[in-house]
Amino acid sequence: MKWCKLNGTCVTGTSGSIDGTGVTLNTSINNVFSVTLSELRPESSAKYRDNVKYLCKGYTWASCSYEIKTNTPQNSQIYSISDDKTQTIFTVTIKELADKNTYYWCIVEIDGGGDVGERFYLSGTTGPPSLYVDNQTVIGFIGENITINCHYTISGAMKWCKLNSNCVTGTSGSIDGTRITLNTSMKNVFSVTLSGLSPESSGWYYCVKGNFQMPVHLTVTEKPIGKRLQTSYVVCHLFVSLITG
């Protein structure tokens, strides 16, 4: 088995890297090998900061159908797309999975040249997810704490990471000056508490359990005065944990 980038290199063992992106291959599931992409490098994506991004559906790039783009009105009842130019990540939300097993492409449009894209295989399953969080978009307040619960149904080492930064692998540590505490006292849950939040605490984080990852975006703001801020977000980010058949 191997995992390759179109017109690029391949990873043939259990781990490696392609263009600065960490690649881990897992064969623990019968008839499936999973591919996890991690530690995306900002220097490799910053040059595409202002380019149009889009999602394309289909096995081959040449025949795939455009589902949604960042420069067109978002009238789709199924797909939505957002582009975080600071984090150099664009996110696609799929509101209902009509096709359980589908190939997609995440693509950056290149003016006057060939577009740049990555294909992934989206596999739908029944039953509880292997790894999930209550909300993938959360808001915290400066100087306060926030706790995120990472639910899992699999075994393996756990850690809490921030994109383009470091990870906490033990019971405590720090990321960008924010104190991190991991608690495993609840069954099939590890809770992550971020203490003393600051604006620098904002960004993309992800729970890791075994070979699975689940992203969470944290926004840290001033606490509103005189009113209560309520949030309720449930989205499906196509981010780092891909299943290929």
Image (spheres, rainbow, N blue to C red):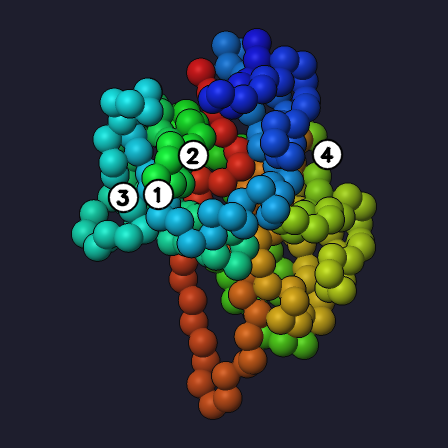
Q: Position of residue 4 (x, y in %)?
A: 53, 19
User: Sequence-wise, which precedes: disc 1 or disc 3?
Assistant: 3
Residue named by callout 4: 157
Provide the residue designation for mark 3: 68
Look at the image and tell me whether residue 126 can be seen.
no
Work out whether mark 1 precedes mark 4 in sequence or the reverse, and give the earlier one.
Answer: 1
Q: Within 10 Å of the Cα at label 3, are there few (<14), some (14-19), or many (20+) other Cα atoms?
A: many
Q: Name the residue at the bottom extreme.
A: 226
Structural crowding at the residue carrying mark 2, measured as other residues with C-alpha within 10 Å and reported as few (<14), some (14–19) or many (≥20): some
Q: Earlier in the sequence, mark 3 or mark 4?
A: 3
Q: CA distance from mark 4 to mark 2?
A: 34 Å
Read off the residue under disc 2: 116
Callout 4 secondary element: loop
**Residue at image x 40%, y 49%?**
51
Q: Which mark is residue 111?
A: 1
Q: Going 77% across and 44% down the picture, which residue do you hit?
A: 169
Select label 1 or label 4 by which is in front: 1
